[in-house]
Amino acid sequence: MVNNKYTDPAVVCVDSMGRNAISVLSGHVGGANRLCEEVAHIIGARPVVTTQSDNLGTWKLDILGKCMGWETDATRAEMNQAIATLVNGKPVGLLLDIRDRGTDYLEADLPANVSIVTDRTDVSKYQLIIAVTPYIYDFDIPILYYRPMVLNLGVGCRRDCNPEGVANYIGNILNDNGISPLSIKSVSTIDLKKDEPLIAKLSTWNNINLCNIYTAEQLAGIEVPNPSEKVLKVTGVAGVAESCAIKASDNGKIILEKHKGKLSDESDFTFAVALDKGALRGGHIEFVGAGPGDPELVSVRGKRFLEQADLILYAGSLVPKELTYYAKPGCTVRSSASMNLEEQFELMKEFYDREKLVVRLHTGDPCIYGAIQEQMAFFDRYGMNYHITPGISSFQAAAAALKSQFTIPEKVQTIILTRGEGRTPMPEKEQLHKLAASQSTMCIYLSAGIVDDVQRELLMAYPPETPVAACYKLTWKEEKIYRGVLKDLARIVHENHLTLTTLLVVGDAINNRDGLSRLYNDNFKHLFRK
């Protein structure tokens, strides 16, 4: 018997000729639309989907929360009405109080009838508000809430506090203060209270699946809005609830200061709530790995940040300018090649303080010789919000350009990423000749200018006929690959006038085709059987 799309299984029908795969039952809620596409891809058929939101290419509101990790308390009737408003092209407002990957997606993919809510005192032009927020609003029009898991509950209590009724009490106080309990993701307390029945009870409340227990040393130095001399004397911290909430939020924002609750003589407790620092809207710095150079090798996430950025500050001497062509109209694009660190910081902070999105675009992957340590220290000092989007490194581009697997079963299982010793000293234990003793595949960065020293050290461990490659501007239009053997490495670099944008690769893995990977040996075939 067919009941409804929320409980019925996904049903897909394929015609007798295998030309069409048709989503019949449970649409995208039950997974039929996705199954339809998968079946069509397998048999080479045409997927037939009749769900309006799929056909329009607009947001799928009934599965949006699940996809993005958000909760919603909308009834089915409310959800269906919201879907009808959206797909019928009625004016819809998007209200965002936090930032995460889901809100980035929504902002980058606004349907034509959806606009960002900028004035919350006048929403009369909308027929629906879609709100991604931990807060509760009182509008005269329908609101479809998505509750992101971004709030942290800090708790303190008397010894052997009776937990009965406390969760409901906290929930009511949150609601009274315009905060949804559905957005609480963690409960935290000090280690003195870790065995309290109240903490065990709250750890299973609503969507909470994370319980943080902190020592007084971990909470030391955290400034709280409502310090208590008594609590400081007993626990060693100025306030348990507030300091734990702030710690759990990574020094985010307190949105509910310490509240005292007392349901009986045996039930005396305090609690506070803080919003994750990483979820705060406003200024944001995103380090983006540009990849080795080809604009098509930046990650999908990195490309999206470039398209949304208000400022793109790129390493002009190392990153092709073409990557900045993803910038939106009005974006400020600056090269950092002629700027010192202080000038870079000043520019980024100017945009950050104006609550803008800044992309700091580094070559390859920012974590490999990316010089981001000083920048992160600066951002930490000023409490600035930042994140890192990784990129493809030039050593991976080198493997692709050389058509080589840098690991060979039973011969080479290690790849070393390093650099020669120039003006920046190398740790004594990481000198090239010591690393080379492992006979691993070595990818040597930033060393074309000292190639004679590099060759000399490598010959202390590798045979002179060891394959080498000098890879210049990998994936750029100017890419050049020079192959040879180790005893000729310096000559290759000098004769071709190679510069700092050259990666040196050394090892028998270069262009190796001998042997068969053990993964395809009969002894390993069970790994591929179901």
Image: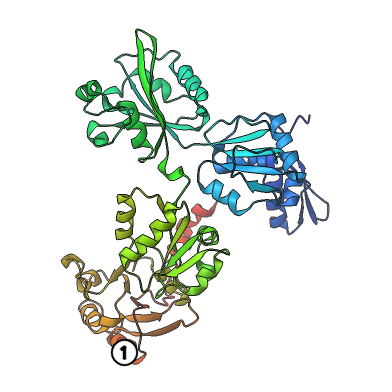
Which amino acid does the dot numbered 1 rest on?
His
Give the quadrant of residue 339: bottom left
x 51%, y 70%: residue: 323
From the viewer's perspective, tell me whether residue 220 is left or right of residue 278: left
From the viewer's perspective, tell me whether residue 420 is left or right of residue 280: left
According to the image, label 1 marks what residue?
Answer: 494
Mark 1, Cα crowd under 10 Å, few <14 / some 14-19 / many 20+, is some
Seen from this angle, which residue lies furthest left? 428
Q: Position of residue 131 (x, y in %)?
A: 60, 38
x 52%, y 63%: residue: 331
Seen from this angle, which residue lies furthest bottom? 495
Q: Quadrant of the N terminus?
A: top right
Q: Position of residue 353 (x, y in %)?
A: 42, 52
Seen from this angle, which residue lies furthest right? 16
Give the quadrant of residue 270: top left
Q: Position of residue 185 (x, y in %)?
A: 45, 33
Residue toward you, 44 or 65:
65
Residue toward you, 419 or 44:
419
Residue toward you, 484 or 417:
417
Seen from this angle, which residue lies furthest front? 121
Residue toward you, 135 or 362:
135
* Res. 218 in view: yes
